[in-house]
Amino acid sequence: MNLHRVYKGEFGYIKYRKNAAIIRTVISLAITVGIYVAGLWKYGSQKNVMSIIAALGCLPTGWSAVNMIMFIKAKGCIENDKDKIEACRGGLLIHYDHVITSYDKNFYVSASTVLDKNICCYSSDEDIDEIDCEKHIKKMIAQSGYSNHSIKIFTDIDKFCDRLTQLEKLRADKGIDPVAIEESWIPGTTQTPASILLSISL
């Protein structure tokens, strides 16, 4: 299982987090069970300090298992869609593999881009509620003062790529460098819309 580090926003992030969660859960479970069995072998009874330690170990193991299940269910960007996006992105900043969390549901967003006051996302999840996702993103960025942004969730990769082509033309005409904007952000100041999208994602 390849665990080459993949950072949030990079293609393959969900797969990386899923593999990491599986390994972490297996190791944590093995340690917890090992401590419990060792206590039984040493003391001949489950009423010992090692059993208490094993019981406490169930807490991080349980958390890890929940995290694992969440990433197993998550839907990342597939290779074919990524190739289409890369072919038309130009100088746009693209972030991949969002699991955007809200109070009552998660939204699986394959890719996103932010340019000027436009936020465009693509999701291959057939069950995504585009309107709810758009409302949630709008609410989250409004908390940082971004209330006039246009937000659109696409579920058709070709339509998303058409929009990327339009935005790339706008970017070139206005001389905007989205990557430079992100790199110039100073910690402690208001986050950019693109970084907010990442911060509200797992």
Image (cartoon, grey):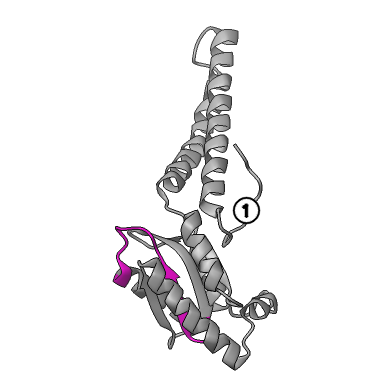
Residue 118 inside the magenta-drawn segment: yes
| Residue at 51% in and 52% down | 14
What span is in magenta? 115-131
| Residue at 42% in and 67% down | 122
The answer to whether residue 8 is above or below residue 33 is below
Q: Percent x, y for residue 2? A: 62, 40
Q: Percent x, y for residue 81? A: 46, 61
Q: Percent x, y for residue 110? A: 45, 61
Label 1 Cα crowd, 10 Å radius (few <14 / some 14-19 / many 20+): some
The answer to whether residue 180 is above or below residue 73 is below
| Residue at 52% in and 29% down | 29
In this view, the residue in front, 166 or 51, is 166
Disc 1 marks which amino acid?
Val
Left or right of residue 164, residue 184 in this image: right
Q: Quadrant of the N terminus?
A: top right
Asked where in the image residue 133 lies, by quadrant, the reply is: bottom left
Q: Secondary structure at mark 1?
A: loop
Name of the residue lying farthest toward the top:
44
Q: Percent x, y for residue 103? A: 36, 61
The answer to whether residue 1 is above or below residue 187 is above
**Residue 139 seen in this snapshot:** no
Asked where in the image residue 177 lies, by quadrant, the reply is: bottom right
In this view, the residue in front, 12 or 165, is 165
Q: Name the residue tied to disc 1.
A: 6
In this view, the residue in front, 76 or 100, is 76
Residue 16 inside the magenta-drawn segment: no
